[in-house]
Image: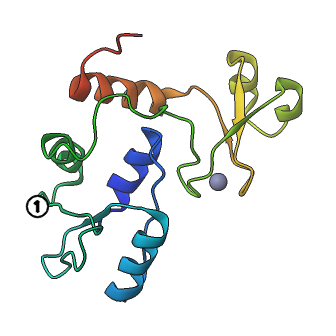
Amino acid sequence: MLGKLAKELRMLGYDTIYYRGENAYSLMKLAREEGRVILTRSSKLTPKRPEDHVVRIKEDKPSSQLRELIQLKAIRSYEETPFSRCLVCNMLLHEIPKEEVEGEVPDFIFYQQKEFFQCPQCSRIYWQGSHQDHMKKKIEELFGKPTA
Ligand SMILES: [Zn+2]
């Protein structure tokens, strides 16, 4: 139910796992082992130990959930590097030389863009595209302009 939020968090650079299992215990265990905060829409999932961090999202509109996380101070402005992760696998992207993406991306993108990034897991290629412009606007709306 939080799939869109998970993608937006990855766009912001947050290390985000989308848990598809049903088992609350194994979710809690994973979060403990990896020091993760659990974001959930469910009121049934509650912290069992002092180290458990569970944030309950009340908004059901995906477009408002990121704002809710900011209001809850669960995330803060520009603490991670936006657009540094694969939106599908959550892996950190690495830059690849432009000549290596020729034929792998649409021609107009190849000629238009200077920098390309690749996911080491799924090999998806990323560039500064229109979805980034859209997300940059959204980030600025939520956080204000970056100071750096
Ligand atoms: Zn990937």
Residue furthest out toward the front: 50
Question: Ligand 1 is found in which quarter of the picture?
Answer: bottom right
Question: Picture coordinates of residue 35 (x, y %)?
Answer: 42, 62
Q: Choose top left, top right, bottom left or bottom right for residue 55.
A: bottom left
Question: Picture coordinates of residue 109 (x, y %)?
Answer: 68, 26
Q: Quadrant of the C terminus?
A: top left
Q: Is residue 130 above or below residue 24?
A: above
Question: Picture coordinates of residue 100 (x, y %)?
Answer: 88, 33
Type of amino acid under label 1: Lys
Q: In the rendered image, which residue does mark 1 sit on? A: 58
Neighbourhood count class around disc 1 (C-alpha, 10 Å): few under 14, some 14–19, many 20 upward: some
Q: Quadrant of the N terminus?
A: bottom left
Horizontal arrangement in the rendering, residue 71 relative to residue 105 (left or right):
left
Q: Image point 28% across, 69% down: which residue? A: 52
Residue furthest out toward the right: 99
In the foreground, 32 or 143: 32
Horizontal arrangement in the rendering, residue 5 relative to residue 129 (left or right):
left
Horizontal arrangement in the rendering, residue 141 relative to residue 110 (left or right):
left
Q: Is residue 74 visible?
A: yes
Q: Image point 72% across, 57% down: which residue? A: 121
Q: Image point 28% across, 42% down: which residue? A: 75
In the foreground, 70 or 140: 70
Q: Image point 17% across, 55% down: which residue? A: 61
In the foreground, 29 or 128: 29
Question: Picture coordinates of residue 76 (x, y %)?
Answer: 28, 35
Q: Choose top left, top right, bottom left or bottom right for residue 88.
A: bottom right
